[in-house]
Amino acid sequence: METAPFTKRLFRTKPTAQIVAEGGHGEGGELRRSMGLVQLTLFSVGATLGTGIFVVLGEATPLAGPAIVVSFVLAALTALFSALSYAELAGTIPVSGSSYSYAYATLGELVAWVCGWCLLLEYAVSVSAVAVGWGQYLNQFLGSTVGWTIPEAVSGPPGEGGVINLTAMAVVFLAAGLLLRGASESATANVVMVFVKVAVLVFFCVLAFTAFDSGNLAPFAPLGLAGISAAGAKVFFSYIGFDAASTAGEEAKNPKRDLPLAILLSLGIVTLIYVGVALAAVGAVPWMEIGGSKATLAVVLQSATDATWPGIILSVGAVVSIASVVLVVLYGQTRILFAMSRDGLIPRIFQKVNPRRQVPVANTVIVSLFVALLAGLVPLGRLADATSIGTLFAFAIVNIGVIVLRFGQPGLPRSFRTPLYPITPVLGVGFCGYLMVKLDGATWLTFTIWTIIGLIAYFLYGFRRSRLAQRGGTP
């Protein structure tokens, strides 16, 4: 007799009207609505553009050869199906919790918790992974200009020549300092950094295409479909971040209109740049020479032009642009934890808002310390793969959520509707599952252990303290 109530409590959903009504409110203050469409779009671009091209390209190209271009398209297609589902739910439930809140409204508390736990893996760990690459480009710049580099012991990840990556920790703390000043200030800084980032990548393409040799593209797919798929699973990491705008739902001026547009526009912008840069890279130098360095694009330019100055410019741009990824993704992590805390699933300190700055100060400080330690102590490769599988799981949940919400609440006002429903969300689930299968056993083991730890945390804390369970909700 006790099983039914227990099961209903685990899968109790939170009404969409209640989720939206609570938006913007935290303990001690409210978040300030200050972001328009341009800022939201560039927020997602800032979170996405840089992770794959500046860091992962060198790891993925040896898996697919010149067909790495197709791998980026495959990953983009996978992201698109999920982006359409994100756009529908972001316009319907415009709050900071992103896919965590969407799961709470459609699939129940336990699934929402697991999704939020995966988002912790996606956001916090991806910040750490990107921060590791930042130190590599900083050294590329310093070595080319002053002939001195930061010692590997404090600029490289442990296990790859480093003891503690202090440069990675430094960029995390710099981003945290900016976030503590306010969301509007952070968004403005991100706009500037994104323009620098795009300008640098256009500069790369112009120079690389001057050395383009079609012979470098043959054979186009030396490792076949398996290589393209494996590289696609790896570079999917580079699309993480298109959903960043959804975490700003409670600080957007017109969230129902702007969030769906920002998500889709940012994915289109990023895909065009990724494909262009990847094609320029494999066309400029033989694909076998791409790899072995975290500063891949700088190495490509130096090889293609036989000059050091282009690499210097690229390194400067990369240092700035990767910092923007750290800034925005760190922001997203704090806002998701803000929503989870408001629901009682994690400690109240994460929802406390500074009434003067209108930002969750304690939340930002705690997350920044955690991410900095992760960035300083864990190697990049495993971080990137673990992030991909957590993200793919969360994206699958969002696609399922669209179907459940359409079925359960067909009359709910929606500012954007996923086209070709239900084909689009079904394909989204399928593509996510396909890429998850392509990840190696060690990554699955990491994901399984992470999920088990999350479930233990939920039953020890969130299950008993859930505000929805205490007040009663919709089973």
Image: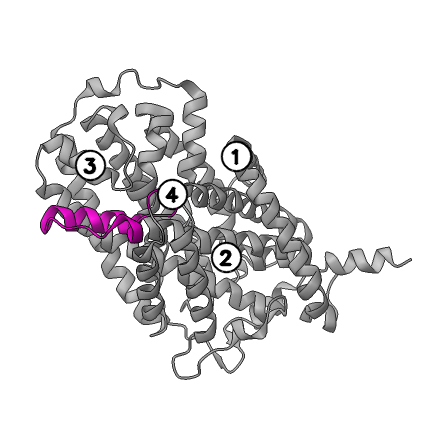
- Report which residue position mark 4 lands on: 238
- Report which residue position mark 2 lands on: 90
- Report which residue position mark 1 lands on: 431
Which stretch did the figure color magenta? 133-161
Q: What amino acid does circle 3 point to? A: Val
Separation of marks 2 and 4 at Cα, in angstroms: 21 Å
User: Marks 2 and 4: which is nearer the front?
Assistant: 4
Q: What amino acid does circle 1 point to? A: Phe
Q: What amino acid does circle 4 point to? A: Ser
Residue 172 image position (x, y, % from top left): 35, 61
- Report which residue position mark 3 lands on: 299
Quadrant in the picture for the C terminus:
bottom right
Judge the density around disc 1: few (<14), some (14-19), many (≥20) Cα neighbours within 10 Å.
Answer: many
N-terminal label among 4 and 1:
4
Residue 32 image position (x, y, % from top left): 41, 75
Judge the density around disc 2: few (<14), some (14-19), many (≥20) Cα neighbours within 10 Å.
Answer: many
Judge the density around disc 4: few (<14), some (14-19), many (≥20) Cα neighbours within 10 Å.
Answer: many
Separation of marks 2 and 1 at Cα, in angstroms: 21 Å
Separation of marks 3 and 1 at Cα, in angstroms: 33 Å
N-terminal label among 2 and 4:
2
Q: Is residue 172 above or below residue 225?
A: below
Q: Is residue 474 above or below residue 51?
A: below
